[in-house]
């Protein structure tokens, strides 16, 4: 004789609500911690030109006294094609306060140098760079 009772609809609904609630709490936790994760830069190339020679670098007032640039420059091995989007976390090191710059060249040979974090102490947060034929827009969310 089978004494196992199947789940009732009520139990299934309660279990579903509990699982959804736990998922919501976990999702909100990740969103709350997002600004404190390692700096990420997103490049959205909406221009007609491919981007290459992409380099992120740290610049601070003590850089002029520091001849060793190890850890202050990160060069990407791959470019961003026209119409593509790329997200990366530059492996940079920082001591004190600094700004982060992004330098790249388009397929016409024109070089750009944009500030992606005007001020940071922790190399954390996000920066969104949108490249069009007319202009470059940067949205900083750096910590």
Image (tube, helix red, strand yellow):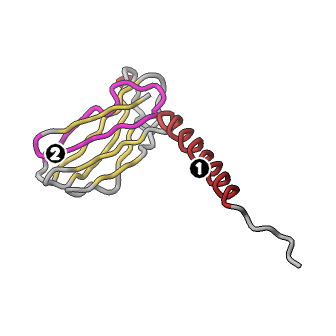
Q: Which mark is residue 29?
A: none
Give the residue pinned by disc 1. Answer: 20
Q: Residues within 10 Å of mark 1 (few under 14, many from 20)?
A: few
Is 133 covered by the magenta stretch? Answer: yes
Q: Quadrant of the N terminus?
A: bottom right
Q: Residues within 10 Å of mark 2 (few under 14, many from 20)?
A: some
On the rendered structure, is 48 left or right of 28?
left
Q: Residue furthest right?
A: 1
The picture places residue 90, in percent across and down from the top left corner, at: 41, 43
Q: Looking at the rendering, which quadrant does residue 126 occupy? A: top left
In percent of the image, x 15 and y 54: which residue is there?
49
The picture places residue 22, in percent across and down from the top left corner, at: 62, 46
Q: Which residues are magenta?
A: 110-134
In percent of the image, x 46 and y 30: which residue is there?
94
Of residues 24 and 40, which is closer to you in this image? 24
Give the residue pinned by disc 2. Answer: 132
The picture places residue 75, in percent across and down from the top left corner, at: 35, 47
């Amino acid at each position: 004789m089978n004494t196992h009772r199947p789940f009732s609809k009520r139990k299934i609904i309660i279990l579903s609500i509990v699982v959804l609630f736990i998922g919501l709490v976990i999702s909100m936790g990740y969103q709350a911690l997002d600004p404190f994760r390692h700096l990420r830069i997103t490049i959205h190339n909406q221009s007609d030109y491919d981007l290459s020679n992409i380099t992120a670098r740290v610049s601070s007032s003590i850089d002029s006294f520091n001849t060793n640039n190890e850890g202050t420059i990160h060069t990407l091995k791959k470019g961003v094609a026209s119409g593509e989007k790329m997200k990366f976390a530059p492996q940079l090191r920082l001591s004190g306060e600094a700004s982060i710059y992004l330098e790249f060249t388009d397929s016409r040979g024109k070089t750009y140098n944009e500030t992606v974090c005007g001020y940071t102490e922790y190399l954390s947060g996000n920066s969104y760079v949108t490249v069009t034929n007319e202009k470059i827009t940067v949205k900083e969310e750096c910590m």
